[in-house]
Amino acid sequence: MYGRYCKLRDNLGLKDSDVAKETSITPSTFSDWKKGKSSPNAEKLVKIARYLKTSVEYLVTGEDPSPAAGYNITSFEYEIIKAFRASSMQDAVLTLLNVSEKQKKEMSMIS
């Protein structure tokens, strides 16, 4: 669990102290998890999952629940959405998408 947590934390550019502050989980608790002295209880897993925008299932098993559940998207599309949510470049991506839509409309008017 700690390895998956670290990967998510690092992808978001966070430190244990950042997560501790926002979840009210003590830094020593994170240290105990890292050393294998203890494992997080359900309440702490939920806090961490919510803060890191993931599922408890992913933290515990490494597998996400059906990413497309209730939606007509592929796993690849789901991964793109997760990466976008974690990205510090969301504005740039949105600008690029808007330009792309504008170009499509212009091209359709020409043809």
Image (tube, rainbow, N blue to C red):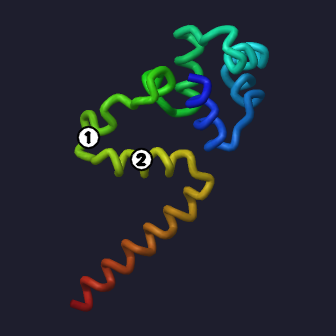
Q: Amino acid at mark 2?
A: Glu
* Residues under numbered marks 2 and 1 in contact, where contact means CB atoms less than 8 Å apart: no
Query: Does residue 56 appear left or right of residue 91 in this picture?
Result: left
Q: Amino acid at mark 1?
A: Tyr
Query: Does residue 38 appear left or right of residue 56 in this picture?
Result: right
Badge 2: few (under 14), some or many (20 or more) residues near its Cα, within 10 Å?
A: few
Q: Position of residue 90 (x, y in %)?
A: 55, 56
In which quadrant of the rendered view does residue 10 lie? top right
Furthest residue toward front: 36
Badge 1: few (under 14), some or many (20 or more) residues near its Cα, within 10 Å?
A: few
99 over 3 or under it: above or below: below
71 over 57 or under it: above or below: below
Q: Position of residue 72 (x, y in %)?
A: 23, 45
- Where the N terminus falls, by quadrant? top right
Query: Does residue 108 appear left or right of residue 10 in this picture?
Result: left
Marking on residue 106: none
71 over 40 or under it: above or below: below
Q: Position of residue 45 (x, y in %)?
A: 55, 17
Q: Tell me which label, 2 or 1, sits earlier in the chain.
A: 1
Q: What residue do we see at 61% from left, 11% from top? A: 39
**Number of marks:** 2
Residue marked by disc 2: 79
Q: What residue do we see at 57% from left, 51% from top? A: 87
Task: Between label 2 and label 1, give the one nearer the viewer.
Answer: 2
Which of 106 and 58 lies nearest the eye of the viewer? 58
> Helix, strand or loop at disc 1?
loop
> Helix, strand or loop at disc 2?
helix
Q: What residue do we see at 45% from left, 29% from top? A: 62
Between the C-alphas of marks 2 and 1, the distance is: 14 Å
- Where the C terminus falls, by quadrant? bottom left
Residue marked by disc 1: 71
